[in-house]
């Protein structure tokens, strides 16, 4: 496997202080997407795969892989009703996004994440927030607004993990 030098994240978008609900939801979700990537900025492959909390399987790279799956499940599968092939999870290992970090090139993990986020944006574009999902997930028939709010919550929680991981890896705080 080729060792990457370090990951370079895009800048975080501006969050408007007022405006329509959809503008706010899109901005906050993109802000958290960029925050996750910012926590990976400047780290090499070894650091991205580091599990800094001894009792946890989570790592920064694992978080990127996990949130790729989250994007796929909620926007592509639930909202759009498409069949999704998970890049990382298997029936026998539902935690594989965190546990098997050596199966893919790190650059490809970030490329898959970028593609999943772009597809999520595309699938939501032009749809009303009250529009119901095409395929309920876990007996939950939710609307697009709920998906946005759930993903913002999911990202906020995992960005908190990423804050701690980054500080434990190299002492970097803030972003």
Image (cartoon, rainbow, N blue to C red):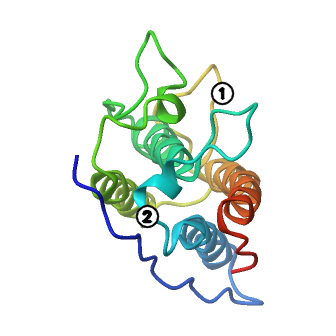
Residue 108, x across and y down, in percent: 27, 53
Asked if 116 appears above or below 99 in the picture, the reply is below
**Identity of the residue drawn at 57% across and 26% down:** 137
Residue 16, x across and y down, in percent: 69, 89
Furthest residue to the left?
A: 2
**Identity of the residue drawn at 74% across and 65% down:** 167
Asked if 57 appears above or below 19 in the picture, the reply is above
For numbered disc 1, what is the local secondary structure?
A: loop
Judging by the rendered image, the residue that carries numbered circle 1 is 140
Q: Nearer the viewer, residue 157 or 62?
A: 62
For numbered disc 2, what is the local secondary structure?
A: loop
Q: Residues within 10 Å of mark 1 (few under 14, many from 20)?
A: few
Q: Nearer the viewer, residue 69 or 169?
A: 169
Q: Nearer the viewer, residue 165 or 110?
A: 165
Left/right of residue 124 with respect to residue 4 in the rendered view = right
* Res. 44 mark: 2
Q: Quadrant of residue 126?
A: bottom left
Question: Sequence-wise, which precedes: disc 2 or disc 1?
Answer: 2
Residue 165, x across and y down, in percent: 70, 56
Q: Mark 1 and mark 2 in contact (Cβ < 8 Å)?
A: no
In three-dimensional space, the C-alpha distance between marks 2 and 1, rounded to whole angstroms, equals 39 Å
**Identity of the residue drawn at 56% across and 85% down:** 13
């Amino acid at each position: 496997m080729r060792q990457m030098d370090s990951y370079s994240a895009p800048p975080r978008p501006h969050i408007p202080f007022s405006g329509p609900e959809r503008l706010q939801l899109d901005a906050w979700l993109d802000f958290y997407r960029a925050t996750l990537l910012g926590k990976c900025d400047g780290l090499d492959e070894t650091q991205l795969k580091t599990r800094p909390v001894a009792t946890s399987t989570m790592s920064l790279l694992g978080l990127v892989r996990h949130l790729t799956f989250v994007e796929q499940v909620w926007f592509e599968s639930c909202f759009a009703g498409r069949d999704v092939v998970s890049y990382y999870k298997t029936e026998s290992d539902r935690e594989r996004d965190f546990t098997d970090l050596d199966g893919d090139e790190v650059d490809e993990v970030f490329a898959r994440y970028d593609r999943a986020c772009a597809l999520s944006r595309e699938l939501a574009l032009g749809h009303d927030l009250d529009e119901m999902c095409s395929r309920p997930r876990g007996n939950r028939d939710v609307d697009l607004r709920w998906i946005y709010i759930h993903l913002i919550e999911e990202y906020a929680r995992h960005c908190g993990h990423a804050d701690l991981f980054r500080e434990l890896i190299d002492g970097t705080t803030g972003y």
